[in-house]
Image (cartoon, rainbow, N blue to C red):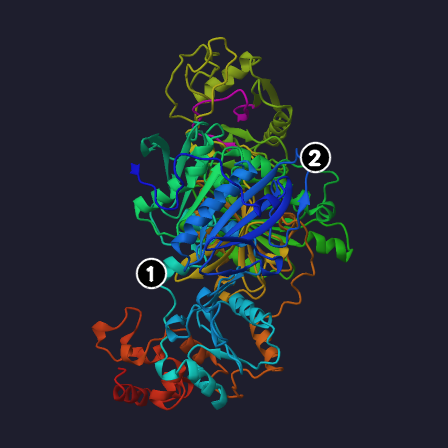
Amino acid sequence: MELTKETEVRPDSIPDLKVDATFRKVPKNAISFAIWKIDEDRLEAVARPQYGTFYDNCAYIIYAANLVGHYASHETITREQKPNVPLERYIHYWLGSQVSEQNRSNVVHKIQELDTYLGNVASIYRESQHHESARFLSYFKNGYDVLSGSLLNAPKQTRLFQLYGRKWLRAIELANVDWAHFNSDYIMVLLMDAMTFVWIGRSSAGIERRSALAWVQRQQRKDVPLCVVDDGYEQSMSAEQKELWNKVLPLQHRMVYQARQSGGDYDSSNCCGNGINGINGLNGYNGSGKSDANANKFRIYKCNQRGRLHLDQLDVGMPSKDDLSDANGVYLLDNFGQSIWLWVGAQATQADALTAMGNGRAFVKKKKYPNTTLVVRVLEGREPVEFKRLFGNWLSVWQDNTRGHKPVSTKFGKLDAVLLGERPKMAADTQLVDDGRGERIIYRICGDEMEQLPPAKATVFTTNASYVVNYTVQCATVVPADLASVGIKSIIYQWNGSEASAETIAKADSYAMASFESLKEPGMFVQLYEFDETPHFLQMFEGKLIIMRGQRSELLHSNNNLNWDFKTNIMLETFLLKIYGDASYNAKAVEEHPLSSISSKDCYAIKTNHVWVWCGQSSTGDAREMAKAVGALLGESSLVLEGKESKEFWQSVAMYFNQSLVINGQSCSSSTTSSSSSSGAGSMCNGSNNSNGNGTGNISPTLSNNCYLNTTMPSKPRPPVQLFLVWWEQRHLRCEEILGFEQRDLSADCTYILDTGTLAYVWLGEHAVSQERERYTTVAQSYVQNAPFGRRAATALAVVRQHAEPNVFKGFFETWDNELGKGFVTYEQMRQQLATIAPSNGLKEGSALILNNNQKDFDGHKKYPLPVLVQEMDMLPPEINPLRREVHLTHDDFVSVFKMSFYEFDELPKWKKQELKKLYKLF
């Protein structure tokens, strides 16, 4: 692909840049945050009180520097650091929707000056109004304002603002006052000398409404009356209020656009959050949010300068860090139009670093992507976490930005619930609520049958069943502060086997959720799938959980074998268990059948006419101890080390597995060596010759059941923890990522997902909408199924409720205050409080806005103008039921047509309602 650079690009020849004197005030080795405004040829520093206020006809430069793993904000105070302290540096340039071409060009030159002054060590983001990156938004916790540049020197007049955004409220001043700007997703604020009107779009969220009322209060118009107007109820205003409103927005011209359609024009230009239907939503880029079958993939190009710029596409499947192999080169990553990333190698020239952004912009133009597409330049060795997250194998980011995975100590004698409550970060690191010694009741579900398992020394699960475990947290204290620090008293676990039927899982879902809902004390719900057991779940069984194949189910759980015992049940005399893990919090024993190969790092428990515990040469002492503990459950066992096997051992194995055992390429049996896998009970290995010839090499495990590959815990460092605000919108799950999150980012009227890499927590706010509170597993599953990192749909899920968060959740936040959020004020309460000091919408008791259930149903439908609703049936919008057109009228239009409210209309006899609808052509 050949590209032509557009006007935002510097010439290829890079002269010595003259750095603006304003930039020279920036300390190079300091934590800092600064904003500059470019208006025509002038560069001026923005005063700190004006941070978060922009003009739509200007371009802005933002510089943020913070310690590695930390996050800057508009409140960051400049602090000098020692030269050897590593810093993350970010430069953003933000372009208002009305910015001139001259300003676009000027800001690019200024960015290059600042980049050169800092030594070409910063990541550079090109931001556009309405399409800012998650990192840009994270700088402004309370959102930001965009003022109209065309009104800057205009005489004082009525002003109209468009407010939207859940986590980050955007307040956009509009150049004119007109109904064309109204949309049911928005909150509109009309500032007049005599009155402040707040118009609430019916599709806006509670958190947006609260933020909007708080924004109005910050405008310092204390002596101006406030009127809150609901979408469709404008006629409910008092005569005086309507007179003021009609002066600028005549109600007879009312035209309010409905909520944005998924994938429509509005969705692509003004989306405040992204659909999780693609990687775009999860990587924090606030772009189109459109669903795309290819959204979870991206292309990588190598940039080559051959006169003109050429891009050579790399043939890659899942992106890997190794694809960026040339430290002298530049690579372009196309996230299917959601974002464009330019990666500059450490040995690339300064010219390459400076022109990379221009190349990215040329690519956007060539591909005909939206002009607002996010473009980011990153440098080798200084990549931001958002970039590293695109690569599933970029382990350095996991190591740099997370605490260790393994617990501080593997001795759990003193690591109890109280200690873990006092040290929530330790609890989060270990993912241990307590020491696992609390009381547990286990229920087994298979098909339509459910039974409670009797207490037994050995706990055995089968892969064709689901299990629900009701666990009581062990907390040896009655001190209220200690109990509060632990956070919960019960955990409902649901474990689904890999062969469990949909019917089985559905029944387990139903029972587990009913158990969770019926808890009288604070609790947590955790849904697990085989291969994704959490540390605390395994700790409950002290690392000795045995998972058998589904074929064993009938033998284990027939009516005659409720008190079965491995030592006496001859029907289970032959099987092999592979031991995963090396500690009580990460170990389990899994039946393998057939076993195609074996590694010297593994340990096995083999049950034939005797119990054998076989340990490879390279297995650790801890792993061997866990294997011996499992072997002891099976009966009297013998420890066998690789290379020191007895003749009796081989005879026992050969008799039952019917194939020679080959370890490291050497035959250890007199029977014929075979390279094929046995079709009998299962072979311990195949006849692979993948040895190094001297008998000391390891054969990598290539298990027939691929699900068990890479499941040893801890398998790899966890990715950085991410927090998302999530909500349903037209059957799609939408999200906004919150970088640099803290506890106060959790709002009681919202639902969030905290993705720890090994477990996805769903946090349910006390006042979250009922759809999210009741469908929490659907929320989590929708997130996981579309998450990055190539994650399986079987990732473990946990559900926690506000004010009942466990220590394992709290520890992911820098600080946690158990009292925070208890004084939460809802939107309705805020509105009532404002009404005591200012007029609201003039409604009186018994008016149409005092809703009953029927009225709420009426308001839940999309609203259309009367001319649309009286059209012929084939001309109606698809979501309108021709037999119920009347519910799509606004309240005001309904009263105007029928001369009564919908509530009164709904009480009429059916024949009377049909007669009226026919009269007004609404039938």
132, above or below 549, in the image = below
Q: 861 or 472, which lies in front? A: 861
Q: 481 or 65, which lies in front? A: 65
Question: Residue 75 sits in which quadrant?
Answer: bottom right
Q: 778 or 660, which lies in front? A: 778
Q: Residues within 10 Å of mark 2 (few under 14, many from 20)?
A: few
513, above or below 151, in the image = above
Image position, residue 886 (x, y; %): 33, 81
3D distance between C-alphas at marks 1 and 2: 54 Å
Image position, residue 204 (x, y; %): 46, 68
Label drawn at residue 77 = none
Identify residue for label 2: 409
Image position, residue 12 (x, y; %): 39, 35
Q: Secondary structure at mark 1?
A: loop
Residue 119 in view of the camera: yes
Q: In percent of the image, x 60 and y 78: which residue is there?
A: 834
Question: Residue 883 sits in which quadrant?
Answer: bottom left
Report the amino acid beneath label 2: Ser
Name the residue furthest top.
694
Left or right: where does residue 781 sit relative to residue 622? left
Left or right: where does residue 510 sit relative to residue 45? left
- Is residue 850 located in the magenta-colored stretch of the structure? no
Residue 781 in view of the camera: no
298, above or below 133, in the image = above
Identify residue for label 1: 264
Image position, residue 490 (x, y; %): 64, 54
Give the prevailing secondary structure in the magenta stretch.
loop
Report the amino acid beneath label 1: Gly
What residue range appears in magenta? Answer: 590-612
- Quadrant the N terminus occupies: top left
Q: 820 or 66, which lies in front? A: 66
